[in-house]
Structures are given as C-alpha cells and as structure tokens.
Amino acid sequence: MQKIITEKIGGKVILLLQEDLDTADQRLTRCLPSLCQAAPELSVWIDCSSLECIKAYGFCHFVNQLLVLKSYGISVTLLHLSRQQQQLLRLLQVDALVAVVPDVAEAYQLAQAS
C-alpha cells in the first residue's frame, strides 16, 4: 500500500507517494481532484527507491500510472530513480513529462527556490 504524505511549501502543495504508485487507490482518487482545484501549483513526488508496482506489474505499468497522473495536469517529480529506469523513460519518450531528482532533500531545495 502506498504512503501518501501531503505537505505545503510556500504556495505549493506537494503530494509525496512512497512504497507504491497506485492511481486506483481510493485515498488518492478522492484527494486528487480537490487538490487540483484548491492548489494552483500541485506537485506529486514519487519515491522510486522501492516501488511495489514495478516489482509486481513491471515498468510499463509504472509508466501508465505516471501518464494517469499527468492527465490531471499535475507536475510529477521522480526521486531515487535508477540510471536504468531513467534510460527506459528516455526510450519510451516519456522522460520529458517528468522531472527526475536524486533525493527528497534536493527536491525540497528546488521547491523552495522556485
């Protein structure tokens, strides 16, 4: 089950997803539409260090989940993405749709700076 952590940084709302990525999760599907309306700058950060969906369903399922999030018009940032996974995103030509940041600390720095 994915952990969903919501945090506010300045005027931005950050949704941090850990352990899994499941856009069918009712907790996520209930909060996304309201967050999209309430927060003009909504970002979803996904900790890719140990995603269950990749282990269980494969990388293409993960990419599908990213595309579902992007359909909401949300900014998506991937954390702890391996070099091999970055290459797969490039090959599938979806790397331009997401930002890749090495870790949470750097993501916070970028969010505070912008």
Image (cartoon, rainbow, N blue to C red):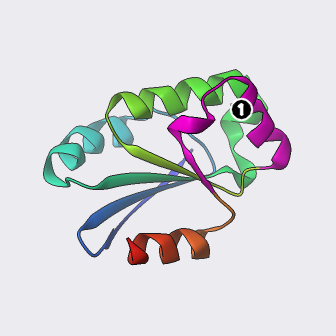
Categorize mark 1 by other alpha carbons within 10 Å: few (<14), some (14-19), many (20+). Answer: few
The x and y percentages for residue 44 are 44, 51
User: What residue is shown at x 59% (from left), y 73% (from top)?
Assistant: 106
Q: Which image quadrant is residue 5 in? A: bottom left
Q: Which residue sits at x=49%, y=71%?
A: 110
User: In the orientation shown, which residue stands out farthest toward the left?
Assistant: 38
Q: State which region is magenta.
A: 82-100
Task: Name the one closer to the observer, 72 or 92.
Answer: 92
Residue 105 coordinates in the image, percent (x, y): 59, 76
The quarter of the image holding the C terminus is bottom left
Residue 69 magenta-drawn?
A: no
Amino acid type indicated by mark 1: Arg
Which residue is drawn at the image coordinates 38% and 53% (left, top)?
Answer: 43
Location of residue 10 in the rendering, given as x and y in whole percent from the top left corner: 27, 75
Please state which of residues 53 and 41 is positioned toward the viewer in this rendering.
Answer: 41
For mark 1, give the secondary structure: helix
Residue 12 % position (x, y): 29, 65
- Determine if residue 24 is in view: no
In the displayed structure image, the side of residue 84 where residue 79 appears, left or right: left
Which residue does the numbered mark 1 point to in the structure image? 90
Would residue 28 be seen by someone viewing this image from the given angle? yes
